[in-house]
Amino acid sequence: MNDTISGAARLPLEPEGADFPYYAGIPQTIRSSGWWIVLAATVAGFAALVTPMPFQDGIATGWLRVAAFVGLPLLALAIAAPGRWTAIFGRVGVREVLLMFGFALLNIIITMSVGLAIKAFGTTSGNDGIVDAANLEGLRMANFFAKVAVQLLGEELITILPFLALLAFLHNKAGWGRNSAVLAAWLVSAVAFGLIHLPTYDWNVVQCVAVIGSARLVLTWAYVWTKNIWVSTGAHILNDWAILSSTIFLTPLAASAG
């Protein structure tokens, strides 16, 4: 159980309750060497997901990639914080489910607004993976949505773990105050998350930083609010499933109706 923080110590966007793990001795502080192991594993997991192979991915290889994407960071966290790696997870009850829907809805509203603004003043690029998914049917379509859900847990891990690592560094090594360290880690991890999407969106820096980055700020807020990666993951899944479903199923219907 994480220690609790009072109103005076927390951010305005953060309710009273559990504090972040691994930076202040609760449940334990991860050493710098441990954080380097965790960060290296997040890079390795991401590389396993996106590195092109000399053969076409099938269902089995696709799941192996996703398993490495999720499993490597968790394995590294278990090595860096033995017996305490589950501190990033929390219970999931009615409150947590409602928060998932709330943050997902907020994320959709914000990213649509930012996306429309960017599109009005420039160009945006599409996601070829979503276009390809529109050609799937039946079990292959169900497999696609299931794999996306697990992959999004990996995306949360490669964002929240660096967020916690940067928080620990800024607070414990650089001497920053807790809240300023949280805000800096929140912003830097969101920008980094946007930048790793550059190949997906045709190297459109503005779109990745402004649209994807703003989405990431909201999703990380779900973790900042709850200290529970299941909530940010659930919000991420609901958000992406809604976008996928509207693109795959509703866009063709609108086109045929027109």
Image (cartoon, rainbow, N blue to C red):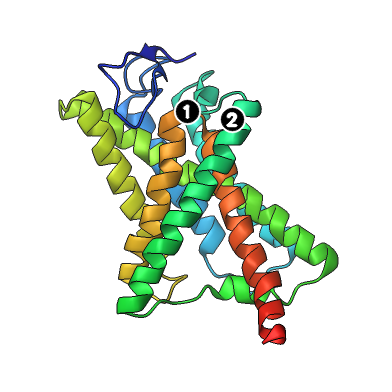
**Which residue carries the number 1 mark?**
226
Relative to 215, say whether 253 is above or below: below
Query: x, y (%) of residue 238?
Result: 61, 49
Whole-percent x, y for residue 3 in the image = 40, 12
Task: Name the residue: 15% across, 25% down.
Answer: 175
Label 2 with label 1: CB-CB less than 8 Å: yes
Q: Is residue 161 above or below residue 216?
A: above
Which residue is depicted at the point 53% across and 49% down?
A: 105
Residue 198 visible: no
Is 49 or 86 nearer to us in this picture? 86
Q: Amino acid at mark 2?
A: Glu
* Label 2 neighbour load within 10 Å: few <14, some 14-19, many 20+: many
Q: Which residue is mark 2?
A: 96
Residue at x 73%, y 67% (from the top left corner):
58
Looking at the image, tell me whether mark 2 or mark 1 is earlier in sequence order. 2
Task: Give whichever of 176, 101 is nearer the camera.
Answer: 101
Specify the label residue 192 is tagged with. Answer: none
Q: Quadrant of residue 142?
A: bottom right
Residue 167 in view, yes or no:
yes
Residue located at (55% from left, 70% from top) = 52
Instruction: Point out residue 180 in the picture as x, y percentages from the top left corner.
Output: 20, 32
Disc 2 element: helix
Disc 1 is placed on an element classified as helix
Pick out the residue farthest to the front: 258
Question: At label 1, which amino acid type do we have?
Answer: Thr
